[in-house]
């Protein structure tokens, strides 16, 4: 019987090559789209869940009340980990983790690369796969370094790296004690090498201050230990060790939830990214469903030709179950052929898709689980696509079929019309979503950043730069390539530090819980950044020695502190740094997200925190000439280090990357949905024209014009699209309104978005059905009526 099914299915495919090509290609596009999305969804759902001890791994978080809001953050004090390891019996192991960037060199090879410092328990706790070395002891030696396989290859080629020397920052030698497999994309840890925590102590970056939160802390609880019980035990540990000077509480977040549930809401970590994952999983399901609907419409549009086949088979004794099996078999065969084509499309587009979503997705052809999924995917798609045509076609009654009286062409409500409404409803939702996302992005891009990003670059204050900074500055300014230069704690596009516990005359106890973003500057901050003063002057530690205790506030800080004339006032710090006198107020500028409100900020003149150098390039010179001059000067004074010059306008543009990804994906899938939907609409138009061919012939004989017949056939589809718009408009408004509430600085959803989306869907639908309508209207009525 299976052989018979297969033979009939192949015969039908070959007999109707054009129909088969459209059917297979439409289903393949839908399956390929669903596969790409599902690969990404699988990557997200398995994030940080592949460690051997995932169920017992937790990251420690802080929780405190700041500015009247309960907030949570992952940075913790350095002494937290050793204290937990010593005094908490439920803890099997604990590790600190801190991201670093150092220059690694061996021989003539020099690489400025990202790495991390961690306690010796890190590798064993997380069970990271080792190629060489012992996970339990690789980080135990103060002079040991663990490399990823790619980093080992970059440094030593194909030779064995174990026991070889790697120099860190041109002043410290480490011996390779282990080689890790390259980390997969679905992990929170992204490093090329690991250094022991003793190196943090050696570089004077370690301290025992419980009020300074600067590292990540992870714990491995013992089997059977309760997370809730451990949270109760560890909650007030910071408060107790700071003699109640701190009010910060500690709690745990499971590693399995770390990636998808990272949004702080009233001090609790709730789903943020998980909503996007669910949304795109839903989109994958809908795209596959729309492709299957297209298959259904194409199949039922040919019911005229298959109906006689069904009638004759039933007359000669075929049971309905046999016919259902035949049609289901045909759909599974088409689904299998479509899946082969979908795999090819996935392979051709996977690199571009990876670049779009910023990850490294792969199809695991060597994994049996993948092939089990593939078979299930094909069978499921075949059943979904073929079920309605199978039951529809097999239900024909032989007597009515052979008489030609089985059809109900002009039924007000039909399954095919409902399916088309569903297709265009989803397409319209995606169109509205795409337009809304891109309008929100443009709205934020047009927001005044508060400083001049043009020809502004920065590099990191590393290697020999601090020792030769004055000479570097002199040579850069003398070259004419740089107009001004400034040292700061962090880039103008990033937030690296914040603090609270400040007081001033007239403040309240609640004001000490205001969280201020902290920056630093030596001189020419405003000139270099192109920011504007609202009052007072800029910091200049060379001209004014007292500026070592000076501070500049931004306008948001002044409003939050409720002071009218801040210049000259004194701000006191509770962390032992003393007092600071306000010398100026800078107009608000965007440091963090352009979608959020600008936070209160303080700019200090603290030399120990100068980690970044900003330079304003000469706009009269070509960019290449400016860059060449910078490279020449930095290479002269810091020859061991490649100087990465980062343009601020490019870094600022990166702030829109996540929303641009969503917008691009929405536009891409909207286009695919519309394309597949149009195939279905084309099929329905063919079905309607085929079943009304005699009516059209009679109308033409009675004098109906081509325009009139075309309008008659097209208006039914116009109504379907209009109904789809009425269905989709409130749904899309609800979805996008909920999405927009996540932004403080957001655009409204105007009526024009809905009008444009509905009009676009209508134009596409009319253009799709017009070909079939005009073709039917131009047909010779003699051919339609000669059998009557």
Image (tube, grey):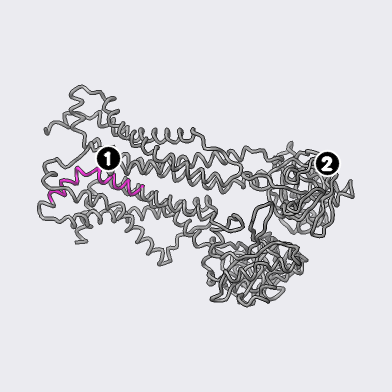
Picture coordinates of residue 5, whole percent (x, y)? 21, 57
Q: Residue 736 or 589: which is nearer the viewer?
A: 736
Picture coordinates of residue 236, whole percent (x, y)? 68, 67
Q: Say if residue 478 shows up in the picture.
A: no
Quick check: 33 left or right of 183? left
Q: In which quarter of the image is the C terminus?
A: top left
- In reply to whether residue 293 is colored magenta, the answer given is yes
Q: Say if residue 643 shows up in the picture.
A: yes
| CB contact under 8 Å: marks 1 and 2 | no
Considering only vertical position in the picture, is 362 above or below 691?
below
| Extreme-top residue of the structure | 703
Q: Residue 311 or 603: which is nearer the viewer?
A: 603
Residue for point 20% across, 33% down: 693
Q: Quadrant of the N terminus?
A: bottom left
Q: Name the residue under label 1.
A: 413
Quick check: 427 left or right of 141? left
Local SS, label 2: loop
Residue for point 65% across, 69% down: 234
Mark 1 / mark 2, whichever is N-terminal: 1
Main secondary structure found in the magenta portion? helix
Considering only vertical position in the picture, is 539 above or below 339?
above
- In reply to whether residue 113 is colored magenta, the answer given is no
Picture coordinates of residue 425, whole percent (x, y)? 39, 41
Picture coordinates of residue 738, whole percent (x, y)? 51, 46
Local SS, label 1: loop
Numbered range of the magenta stretch: 290-312
Q: Which labelled disc corresponds to residue 364?
A: none
Q: Mark 2 points at which residue?
A: 537
Question: Which numbered mark, 1 or 2, is in the foreground of this view?
Answer: 1
């Amino acid at each position: 019987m299976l052989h018979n099914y297969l033979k009939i299915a192949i015969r039908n495919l070959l007999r109707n090559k054009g129909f088969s090509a459209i059917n297979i290609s439409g289903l393949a596009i839908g399956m390929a789209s669903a596969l790409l999305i599902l690969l990404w969804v699988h990557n997200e759902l398995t994030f940080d869940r592949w460690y051997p001890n995932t169920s017992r791994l937790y990251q420690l978080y802080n929780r405190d009340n700041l500015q009247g809001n309960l907030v949570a953050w992952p940075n913790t004090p350095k002494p937290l980990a050793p204290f937990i390891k010593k005094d908490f019996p439920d803890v099997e192991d604990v590790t600190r983790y801190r991201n670093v960037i150092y220059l690694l060199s061996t021989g003539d090879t020099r690489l400025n690369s990202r790495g991390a410092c961690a306690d010796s328990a890190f590798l064993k706790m997380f069970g990271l796969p080792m190629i060489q070395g012992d996970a339990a002891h690789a980080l135990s030696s103060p002079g040991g370094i663990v490399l990823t396989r790619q980093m080992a290859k970059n440094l030593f080629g194909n030779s064995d790296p174990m026991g070889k020397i790697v120099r860190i920052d041109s002043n410290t030698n480490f011996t390779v004690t282990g080689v890790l497999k390259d980390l997969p994309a679905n992990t929170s840890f992204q490093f090329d090498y690991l250094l022991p925590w003793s190196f943090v102590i050696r570089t004077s970056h370690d301290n025992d201050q419980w009020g300074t939160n600067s590292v990540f802390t992870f714990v491995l609880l013992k089997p059977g230990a309760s997370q809730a019980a451990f949270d109760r035990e560890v909650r007030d540990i910071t408060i107790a060790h700071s003699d109640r000077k701190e009010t910060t509480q500690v709690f745990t977040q499971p590693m399995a939830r770390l990636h998808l549930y990272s949004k702080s809401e009233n001090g609790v970590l709730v789903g943020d990214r998980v909503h996007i994952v669910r949304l795109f999983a839903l989109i994958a399901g809908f795209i596959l469903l729309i492709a299957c609907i297209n298959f259904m419409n194409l199949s039922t549009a040919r019911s005229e030709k298959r109906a006689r086949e069904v009638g004759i088979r039933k007359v000669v004794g075929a049971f309905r179950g046999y016919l259902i099996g035949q049609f289901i078999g045909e759909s599974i065969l088409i689904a299998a052929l479509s899946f082969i084509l979908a795999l090819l499309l996935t392979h051709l587009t996977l690199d571009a898709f990876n670049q779009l979503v910023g990850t490294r997705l792969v199809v695991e052809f060597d994994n049996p689980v993948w092939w089990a999924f593939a078979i299930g995917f094909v069978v499921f798609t075949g059943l979904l696509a073929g079920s309605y045509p199978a039951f529809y076609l097999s239900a024909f009654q032989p007597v009515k079929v052979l008489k030609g009286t089985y059809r109900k062409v002009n039924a007000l409500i039909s399954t095919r019309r409902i399916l088309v409404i569903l297709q265009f409803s989803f397409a319209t939702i995606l169109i509205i979503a795409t337009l809304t996302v891109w309008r929100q992005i443009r709205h934020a891009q047009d927001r005044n950043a508060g400083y001049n990003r043009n020809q502004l670059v920065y590099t990191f204050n590393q290697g020999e730069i601090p020792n030769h900074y004055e000479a570097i500055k002199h040579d850069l300014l003398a070259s004419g390539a740089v107009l001004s230069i400034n040292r700061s704690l962090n880039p103008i596009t990033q937030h690296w530090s914040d603090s609270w516990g400040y007081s001033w005359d007239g403040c309240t106890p609640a004001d000490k819980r205001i969280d201020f973003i902290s920056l630093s500057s030596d001189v020419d901050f405003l000139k270099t950044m192109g920011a504007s003063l609202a009052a007072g002057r800029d910091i200049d530690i060379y001209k004014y020695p007292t500026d070592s205790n000076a501070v500049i506030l931004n306008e948001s800080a002044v409003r939050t502190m409720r002071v009218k004339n801040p210049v000259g006032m004194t701000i006191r710090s509770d962390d032992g740094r003393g007092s600071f006198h306000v010398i100026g107020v800078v107009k608000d500028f965007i440091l963090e997200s352009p979608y959020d409100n600008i936070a209160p900020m303080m700019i200090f003149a603290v030399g120990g925190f100068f980690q970044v150098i900003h330079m304003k390039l000469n706009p009269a010179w070509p960019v290449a000439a400016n860059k060449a001059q910078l490279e020449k000067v930095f290479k002269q004074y810091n020859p061991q280090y490649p100087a990465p010059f980062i343009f601020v306008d490019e870094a600022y543009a990166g702030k829109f990357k996540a929303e641009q990804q969503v917008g691009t994906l929405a536009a891409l899938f909207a286009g695919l949905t519309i394309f597949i939907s149009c195939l279905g609409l084309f099929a329905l138009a063919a079905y309607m024209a085929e079943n009304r061919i005699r009516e059209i012939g009679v109308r033409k004989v009675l004098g109906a014009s081509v325009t009139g017949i075309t309008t008659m056939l097209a208006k039914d589809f116009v109504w379907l699209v209009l109904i789809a718009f009425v269905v989709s408009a409130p749904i899309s408004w609800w979805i996008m309104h909920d999405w927009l509430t996540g932004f403080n600085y957001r655009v409204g959803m105007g009526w024009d978005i809905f009008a444009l989306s509905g009009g676009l869907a209508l134009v596409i639908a009319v253009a799709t059905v017009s070909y079939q309508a005009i073709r039917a209207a131009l047909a010779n009525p003699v051919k339609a009526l000669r059998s009557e």
